[in-house]
Image (tube, helix red, strand yellow):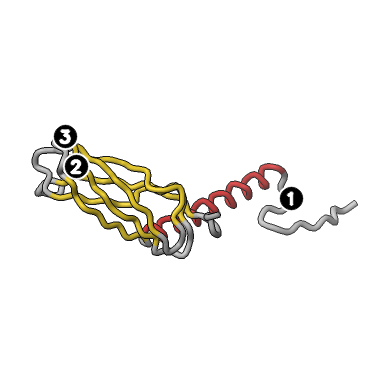
């Protein structure tokens, strides 16, 4: 008797091992696509801030994060850094900004960094967020 089975697909006549490999490939491709989308969206923020040196032990950076992207963003954090004259980071602080910033929206923040001798300038960047799907506001 001859074997008349026909097999199609990536792994003909494969068992559970092939299905596992296919599942891993699908998950990996999805993760890569999400990372690329998140990295692309990170460029869609504008951050402005003012420096308040009123406290001798810490510098407060009061500002606004604007979401110029086309998607809502969730769980947004900023990293504030104090830099010396050579551009080396001499102090850092991480601050939660907002649970949600809609596309085209904005949220205020107040971040603190230690008052360090030699700090001549500051920078603030969005350091963590998730891309939302659809409107997250009520």
Relative horizontal placement of residue 27, taking residue 11 as reference (left or right): left
Query: Tag 3 or tag 1, which sits nearer the N-term?
Result: 1
Residue 25 position within the rendered picture, expressed as x and y whole percent measured from the top left: 58, 51
Q: Which of 59 and 5 is in front in this view?
A: 59
> What residue did someone put label 1 on?
13
Which residue is found at the position 15% from the left and 42% from the top?
54
Q: Check disc 2: other Cα within 10 Å, few if <14, some if 14-19, many if 20+.
A: many
Q: Is mark 2 on a helix, strand or loop?
A: strand
Q: Nearer the viewer, residue 103 or 40?
A: 103
Residue 89 position within the rendered picture, expressed as x and y whole percent measured from the top left: 19, 43
Tell me how far mark 1 sits from mark 3, CA to CA: 69 Å
Tell me how far mark 2 sits from mark 3, CA to CA: 7 Å
Residue 112 position within the rendered picture, expressed as x and y whole percent measured from the top left: 25, 41
Q: Is mark 1 on a helix, strand or loop?
A: loop
Tell me how far mark 1 sits from mark 2, CA to CA: 65 Å
Q: Check disc 3: other Cα within 10 Å, few if <14, some if 14-19, many if 20+.
A: few
Query: Tag 2 or tag 1, which sits nearer the N-term?
Result: 1
Q: Residue 17 lies in what quarter of the image?
A: top right
Label annotation for residue 57: 3
Residue lying farthest to the right in this orientation: 1
Q: Check disc 1: other Cα within 10 Å, few if <14, some if 14-19, many if 20+.
A: few
> What residue did someone put label 2 on?
59
């Amino acid at each position: 008797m001859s074997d008349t089975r026909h097999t199609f697909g990536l792994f003909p006549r494969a068992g559970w091992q092939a299905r596992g490999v296919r599942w891993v490939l699908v998950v990996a491709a999805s993760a890569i696509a999400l990372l690329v989308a998140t990295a692309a969206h990170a460029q869609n923020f504008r951050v402005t801030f003012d420096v308040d040196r009123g406290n001798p032990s810490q510098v407060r950076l009061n500002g606004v994060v604007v979401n110029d992207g086309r998607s809502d963003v969730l769980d947004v954090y900023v990293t504030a850094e104090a830099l010396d004259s050579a551009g080396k980071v001499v102090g850092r602080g991480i601050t939660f900004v907002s649970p949600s910033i809609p596309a085209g929206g904005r949220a205020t923040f107040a971040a603190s960094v230690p008052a360090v001798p030699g700090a001549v300038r500051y920078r603030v960047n969005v350091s963590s967020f998730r891309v939302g799907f659809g409107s997250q506001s009520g």
